[in-house]
Amino acid sequence: MKVELFPFQNKAVTDLRMKVAEALGSYRRMHVPQVVSLQAPTGAGKTLIMAALVEDIYSGTDQYTEQPEAIFVWLSDSPALNEQSKQKFDFKADKIRFDQCVTIEDESFDMELLEDGHIYFLNTQKLGKAANLGKHSDTRQFTIWETLEKNSKRKGRPPLLYYR
């Protein structure tokens, strides 16, 4: 990280990293989706904590091997929140390249699989029944739901989701 985390933030990253590793192991054994939760008050630096966690997962730590192929889907209710989160990743995280942060646009999205090593920012309103991401069209061969399902099946692990 380009900034020093507060001790409580470092503890949160360490705890989350352990929980994510346990959840991934459990998923690989039982093939049941797992949930890891980060709860903190407003202003505690949840985005910064998550950026540090993503760095740790991509780069590895003394306790955990690197996982440069990990895929993250960052969900929020607002495109502005997604942009704000991307900016924080760019300004605060030194092991995450800006080109690893991809905004999923409903007009142009058509991927069979998400690319390894990327963080995909997605607005929750684009996931509704009326939204284009869930529909096939002349320009969309794969819906977002098909892409996420194919990722889970072909890569043996679902993308890691974060909801802000």
Image (cartoon, rainbow, N blue to C red):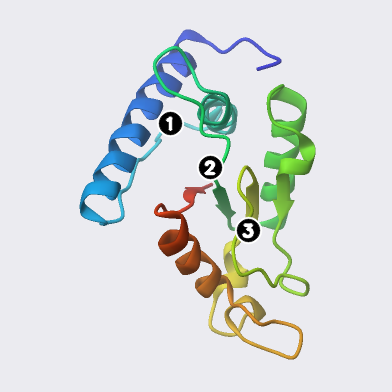
Please identify, in this view, whether the residue under mark 1 or under mark 2 is nearer the observer.
Answer: 2
Residue type at mark 3 is: Leu
Please identify, in this view, whether the residue under mark 3 or under mark 1 is nearer the observer.
Answer: 3
- Tell me the element at label 3: strand
Residue drawn at 59 percent across, 58 percent down: 77
Image location of residue 102, percent across then percent down: 72, 51
Image height of 23 relative to 149, above or below: above
Judging by the rendered image, the residue that carries numbered circle 2 is 70
To which quarter of the image does residue 37 belong?
Answer: top left
Image height of 99 relative to 159, above or below: above
Residue type at mark 2 is: Ala
- Tell me the element at label 2: loop
Q: Which residue lies furthest to the front in this view?
A: 154
Residue type at mark 1 is: Ala
Residue drawn at 40 percent across, 27 percent down: 17
Which of the two labelled residues, at mark 1 and mark 2, occupies the earlier sequence position?
A: 1
Mark 3, Cα crowd under 10 Å, few <14 / some 14-19 / many 20+, is many
Which of the two labelled residues, at mark 3 and mark 2, occupies the earlier sequence position?
A: 2
Q: Do the residues labelled 1 and 2 touch (CB within 8 Å)?
A: no
Q: Are marks 3 and 1 in contact (CB under 8 Å)?
A: no
> Foreground: 15 or 70?
70
Report the side of 4 relative to 32 (left or right).
right
Rounded to the nearest angstrom, the CA distance separating label 3 from label 2 is: 17 Å
Judging by the rendered image, the residue that carries numbered circle 3 is 122
Q: Which residue lies furthest to the left in this view?
A: 30
- Tell me the element at label 1: loop
Image height of 16 relative to 123, above or below: above
Which of the two labelled residues, at mark 3 and mark 1, occupies the earlier sequence position?
A: 1
Judging by the rendered image, the residue that carries numbered circle 1 is 40
Image location of residue 2, percent across then percent down: 71, 15
Mark 1, Cα crowd under 10 Å, few <14 / some 14-19 / many 20+, is few
